[in-house]
Amino acid sequence: MDSIRIYTKAALRMYDAVVMGLLARHVWGCPPDLLVEHYRQHVTSNHADIGVGTGYCLDRCGFAATEPRLLLIDLQPNCLEYAARRLARYHPQMLVRDVLEPMPNLSRRFDSVALAGVLHCLPGDMRHKAHAFDTLRPLTHPGSKIFGYSLVANTTRRRRRSDVVLHLLNRMRIVDNTGDRASELARELSSRFTECNVEQIGHMAFFSAVIQ
């Protein structure tokens, strides 16, 4: 995935200010507090996080247990190292892995798995991106929650600057979401899970599902 190349150590130091402080609030129409609140609603103290970025939401959401079991999964080692340092108080484990490739079969599985800001970076249409939900199953058990959020091309409130920035990011191959719609994400989730939900705020589609 070309998008992982931008996550240099220097870029990660600016990520929160640019992506969370500027883009999320003023371009995507979705304040970062809503991203953190989505985590609070669904995260458990036995959690795997895929596409960890800087660990922004995990750092702020809080866990019910003082010593949660936390696994960080990312294809970019820089992201893993940055997030692991930030979350060092939780002693997270790390795994370098492509989300579209099979996950390891673990003897002890997770109660929650997050895919936050991952789908819009994956190539192809939503049907192809949704294979990520299938590769996650070895990490889960019946009753596990899968949740996250993803940028979609359409919006609940039209903004010219949003269109311009999304077009630029797609041309730079930082994201690949020109055809992504919340309705298509909902269709892929409902074809796999009986209990799922998708809610769109601005350009951000929040989703959650329960493994049966």
Image (cartoon, grey):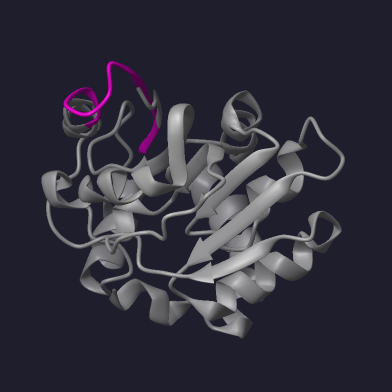
Image quadrant in which you'd find residue 206: top left
Q: Where is residue 3 in the image (x, y as percent from the top left)?
A: 35, 72
> Between residues 142 and 194, which one lies in front from this camera angle?
142
Apparent side of residue 96 relative to residue 189 in the rendered image (left or right) = right
Apparent side of residue 94 relative to residue 162 in the rendered image (left or right) = right
State which region is magenta.
Answer: 189-206
- Where 8 sits versus 185, above or below? below
Q: How many marks?
A: 0
201 falls in the magenta region: yes
Q: Position of residue 108 (x, y in %)?
A: 57, 46
208 falls in the magenta region: no
- Where 154 sits versus 115, above or below? above
Q: Where is residue 128 in the image (x, y as percent from the top left)?
A: 14, 51
Image quadrant in which you'd find residue 190: top left
Q: Which residue is drawn at 45% across and 47% down?
A: 139
> Between residues 137 and 6, which one lies in front from this camera angle?
137
Q: Residue at x 76, y 70 (%)?
A: 85
List the single residue furthest toward the top.
Answer: 195
List the single residue furthest toward the front.
Answer: 107
Which quarter of the rendering shows the N terminus?
Answer: bottom left
Which quarter of the rendering shows the C terminus?
Answer: top left
Q: Which residue is drawn at 76% across and 59% down?
A: 87
Q: Which residue is drawn at 60% across and 67% down?
A: 94
Apparent side of residue 81 relative to residue 111 in the rendered image (left or right) = right
> Between residues 182 and 141, which one lies in front from this camera angle?
141
> Between residues 71 and 2, which one lies in front from this camera angle?
71
Apparent side of residue 119 relative to residue 201 in the rendered image (left or right) = left
